[in-house]
Image: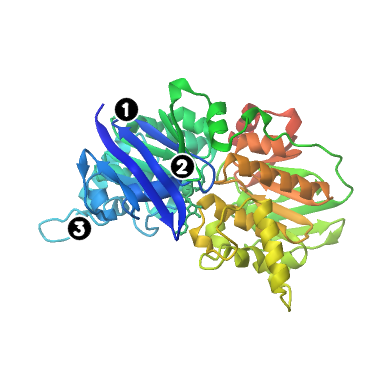
Amino acid sequence: MEKLLEIKNVSKSYSGVQVLKDVNISLSAGEVLCFVGENGAGKSTLIKIIAGDIQANSGEVVYFGKKYESTSPKQIIDIGVATIYQEIDLIENLTVADNVFLGREIINRMGAINTKEQVDRTNRLIEKLHLEDIHGDDMLSNLSTAQKQCVQIVKALQNEAKILILDEPTASLGDKEKKTLLELVKGLSSQKIGIIYISHFIDELFDVGNTFLVLKDGVQVVVRSKEETTPDQIINDMIGRDASNFYKREYFPTGKRVLKIDHYDNKRNVHDICLEIRSGEVFGFGGLIGAGRTDLVRMIYGLDKKTNGKLYLNDKEITPRTPKDALNKGIFMISEDRKGEGLLLMRSVRENIMITHNEKREMINLKKEKETANQSIAAYRVKTVDQEALVSNLSGGNQQKTIIARCTIDDGDVYIFDEPTKGVDIGAKEEIYEHMLNIAKHDKFVILISSDMPELLSMSDRIGVMCSGKLVEVVNSQDTSEDKLMRKYLGY
Ligand SMILES: Nc1ncnc2c1ncn2[C@@H]1O[C@H](COP(=O)(O)OP(=O)(O)OP(=O)(O)O)[C@@H](O)[C@H]1O
Ligand SMILES: [Mg+2]
């Protein structure tokens, strides 16, 4: 097999902290190589080195059999390596074709951009990839996250990439969209494109992957081929314990208090939602992406406009007008878009954890604050050099854990978790589950939105299924299954 890429003894450290140590791996044509490991293991760092975004301290990367003295991101793209990061890197108010050809426009004899040719070529590629629902002249802003993800792939292929790198491409996708993307990746590998794939979903890795590189604290633990391993073994390599001992939630009687969601509506994509939730229960919301779950909880939290809707706690109205009002009433929300909405990237881990807590206080006791921050860092196993480190230097998953820590240090009453384990490794997921249950157990209200069906089923007492902005059914999790739920999501 032709070797597309060879990584030889690559090491990297940041201010004396080693994040990669002597990594050796190669990628062949048509191979799907997966990087697996806990949050902060070094997966994204390795990708950034391959993409030329950062330089290794020692070791080398050989591209298509050739060594390069120094590399820039542009040069790496030009030799045929496309990297798709988790955050979508496209321009919203351009068309799909304009995005695909951005920086490599087709110019006609008059010196103008040949829009028609760009759209035609984009459409041909889209067709070749069987992405029927996307068109070259669609405005990017009209597409779903999954479709944008696909446009990034179209763009990479237009640039004739022979190596495609995907860093957690499915983290923001629902089940159905995930399948489309996975099929696309499999199709590309059959066309001899070499693929590097990162994901925290083990079943997904076994679906697309041929080879697994397991990293732990920057050290290469093992390389395994799919034929000679199992998901359990990979999890064991990753976190050093058995997958079969995995988290089983504890059930306890629900409390007496009632949270009533009354006629919530925005006359757009959320229609007249009425629901009663009991304290002590974990109430899950299921549905496909776009079903209206996030929009509903954003209204409840006072973040988005509504045309109707009141919130009652034991018959007393507590409808939040703004997020600040919600906080004062003990309502917390861990939002789905944590990077966009919550994280202060240029502040320390401590400041990020303590910010909402401090907003409510006139005096800040630094000593106490440091203690609390340290406790949270330990409780959520946030991997950081210390609490004064910049949050922007943490790995993706550890940034997520920081936000969750922030929202759970104060004593509240209602906790809304929107996709709380997105991008979080399998060990850390357990810790988040434990915290959620602990909250419920103290007679609080816990609302969970999750696109991860096994998670939703195993964590929720009851699940409200949403479809096109309507609450179609509320089921007991014990009485349903993934299969049944999916049918309900799709509306049949
Ligand atoms: N610019 C930086 N300065 C200091 N430390 C950094 C920097 N970038 C990354 N790190 C550290 O390197 C380690 C590896 O991070 P990396 O992003 O590669 O992890 P990851 O395996 O991708 O994790 P995740 O699953 O959470 O995305 C982390 O401990 C992180 O804090
Ligand atoms: Mg990462």
Q: Earlier in the sequence, mark 3 or mark 2?
A: 3
Query: In the shown orientation, is residue 455 left or right of residue 102?
Result: right
Disc 1 CB within 8 Å of nearest ligand 2 atom: no
**Residue 415 pos. (x, y %):** 73, 54
Mark 2 in CB contact with mark 1 (< 8 angstroms): no
Assign the N terminus to one quadrant of the image: top left
**In the image shown, does 32 or 336 lie closer to the viewer?**
32
Task: Please tell me whether mark 3 sits on a helix, a strand or a loop.
Answer: loop
**Residue 172 pos. (x, y %):** 52, 46
Look at mark 2 in the image and give the residue it sits on.
219
Q: Amino acid at mark 1?
A: Ser
Look at mark 1 in the image and give the residue it sits on.
190
Query: In the shown orientation, is residue 29 left or right of residue 114?
Result: right
Front tag of 3 and 2: 2
Assign the C terminus to one quadrant of the image: top right
Q: Amino acid at mark 3?
A: Ile
In space, the residues marked 2 and 1 are separated at their CA atoms by 30 Å
**Residue 488 pos. (x, y %):** 64, 33
Look at mark 3 in the image and give the residue it sits on.
113
How many neighbours does mark 2 have within 10 angstroms: few (below 14), some (14-19), or many (20 or more)?
A: some
In space, the residues marked 3 and 1 are separated at their CA atoms by 33 Å
Q: What residue sits 57% from the left and 45% below the top?
A: 424
**Residue 184 pos. (x, y %):** 38, 34
